[in-house]
Image (cartoon, rainbow, N blue to C red):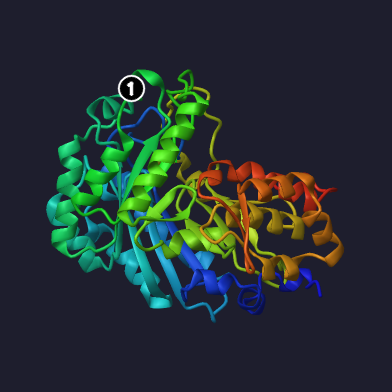
């Protein structure tokens, strides 16, 4: 029996649909804290960030984070206790861990932190800080290496060296941090693309990395890279294939299209499994938990961001216009059932397990599912092994995950033929 709109995000449905079995963690809320300050701006980066700030700007920003946490937490039901915390950026490691102590104490006074991640930069990290991150409560580090090839690092505008990356991993391990994820960018154009990405991942693992996040370089209009080009599609597919092979050999399981590790991140899985999260700090996005007024949750973005017309512009409105940094921009209108389900099709298909068949049965009518299973394109993909159907899940093959977004849009068009693809207007 198809469930009502008010129930589709409930804990009962999360358990009954099989998602809870795949998720396997207690947290039902993530807290993402955006730290937009950087020592320099990388030419490919489209995140909200700035390298133009003062000490006063930083202290005012950190104080405002606590006020915004208080405001957003008022919308979180009291029964939600276990959370994850993720410090992202920008460059959170640009500042000593003690700068985050008041915010962490505030979070801990309301919630139990099940997992605590900090993004770090090999250029700005100090060896002694890894011990301090551990003392702050950090359980997981992501290291923005991007590559171990000097020519790739130069092309990407990174200031660190391959030796810095290795030293960072070893320092984190020596401090007692057991979960060290390293970011790697692939799909770089031919002039610098002759790097051996599989060899780089092997070296990272040899020195103590417990996983890698491999992201395809994307060219954004607002960045200094807007006139650059990616590697040809065939090169991208070949690189991705080599990433799959080396990660399998190293025991880095493919938990999601881009994420390979010995153990998956709880925080990332909150996004993948459609659970709510608070975004705090300018440029952060959030999804408030379901409420009577918004039974499917409510999306928002923090900060009134001006249109960036100059590639690489990193200005933020500190001082006279600083209030713009923390204004909440609510999504237009109510979040619809179709929006929520299409978003979950997109994220679940990217995961290791894919979509539980129980979830399909809970969310869609028998007639709608009959239309899905009779879809010609889906049948051909199943026959070819691009999509796998077990007794419990519909899953993309590891290699087919690189086309996961296209498959999600196709499934959405079959399951929601009268609704445009999901998109959030903020």
Instruction: Judge from the rendering whether residue 276 lies leftward or rightward of residue 39; answer left or right.
Output: right
Q: Residue shown at 47%/76% (left/top)?
A: 26
Q: In this view of the protein, can residue 23 be seen by the observer?
A: yes
Is 43 placed above or below 338 here? above
17 and 285: which is toward the camera: 17
Q: Quadrant of the N terminus?
A: bottom right
The image shows a total of numbered marks equal to: 1
Q: Residue shown at 78%/64% (left/top)?
A: 364
Quarter of the image holding residue 150? top left
Q: Position of residue 191 (x, y in %)?
A: 35, 18
Q: Residue shown at 32%/39% (left/top)?
A: 198
Quarter of the image holding residue 193? top left
Q: Secondary structure at mark 1?
A: helix
253 and 169: which is toward the camera: 253
Q: Position of residue 63 (x, y in %)?
A: 36, 57
Is 12 placed above or below 423 here? below
Is 383 placed above or below 221 here? below
Q: Residue shown at 40%/63% (left/top)?
A: 85
Q: What residue did someone put label 1 on? A: 192
Q: In this view of the protein, can residue 68 be seen by the observer?
A: no
137 and 263: which is toward the camera: 263
Q: Residues within 10 Å of mark 1 (few under 14, many from 20)?
A: some
């Amino acid at each position: 029996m198809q469930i009502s709109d008010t129930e589709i995000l409930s804990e009962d449905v999360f358990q009954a649909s099989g998602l809870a079995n795949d998720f396997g963690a207690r947290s039902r809320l993530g807290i993402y804290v955006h730290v937009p300050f950087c020592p320099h701006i990388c030419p490919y980066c489209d995140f909200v960030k700035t390298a133009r700030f003062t000490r006063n700007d930083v202290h005012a920003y950190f104080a405002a984070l606590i006020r915004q946490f208080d405001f957003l937490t008022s919308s979180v039901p009291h029964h939600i206790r276990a959370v994850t915390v993720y410090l992202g950026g920008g460059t959170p490691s640009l500042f000593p861990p003690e700068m985050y102590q008041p915010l962490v104490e505030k979070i801990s006074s309301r919630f139990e932190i099940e997992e605590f991640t900090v993004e770090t930069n090999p250029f700005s990290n100090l060896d002694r800080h890894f011990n301090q991150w551990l003392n702050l409560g950090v359980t997981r580090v992501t290291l923005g290496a991007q590559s171990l090839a000097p020519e790739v690092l130069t092309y990407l505008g990174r200031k660190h060296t391959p030796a810095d990356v290795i030293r960072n991993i070893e320092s984190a391990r020596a401090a007692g941090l057991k979960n060290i994820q390293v970011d790697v960018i692939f799909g770089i154009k031919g002039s610098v693309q002759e790097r051996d990405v599989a060899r780089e991942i092997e070296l990272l693992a040899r020195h103590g990395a417990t996983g890698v996040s491999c992201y395809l370089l994307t060219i954004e209009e607002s960045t200094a890279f807007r006139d650059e080009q990616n590697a040809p599609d065939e090169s991208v597919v070949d690189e991705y294939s080599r990433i799959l092979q080396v990660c399998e050999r190293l025991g880095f399981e493919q938990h999601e299209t881009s994420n390979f590790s010995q153990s998956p991140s709880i925080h990332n899985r909150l996004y993948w499994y459609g659970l709510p999260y608070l975004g705090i700090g300018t440029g952060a996005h959030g999804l408030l938990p379901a409420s009577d007024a918004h039974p499917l949750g409510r999306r928002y973005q923090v900060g009134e961001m001006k249109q960036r017309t100059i590639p690489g512009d990193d200005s933020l409105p500190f001082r006279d216009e600083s209030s713009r940094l923390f204004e909440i921009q609510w999504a237009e209108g109510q979040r619809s059932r179709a929006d929520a389900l299409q978003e979950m099709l997109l994220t679940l298909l990217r995961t290791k397990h894919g979509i539980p068949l129980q979830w399909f049965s809970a969310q869609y009518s028998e007639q709608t599912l009959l239309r899905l299973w009779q879809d010609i394109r889906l049948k051909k993909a199943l026959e070819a092994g691009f999509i796998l159907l077990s007794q419990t899940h519909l899953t993309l093959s590891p290699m087919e995950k690189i086309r996961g977004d296209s498959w999600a849009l196709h499934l959405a068009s079959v399951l929601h033929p009268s609704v445009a693809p999901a998109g959030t207007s903020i």
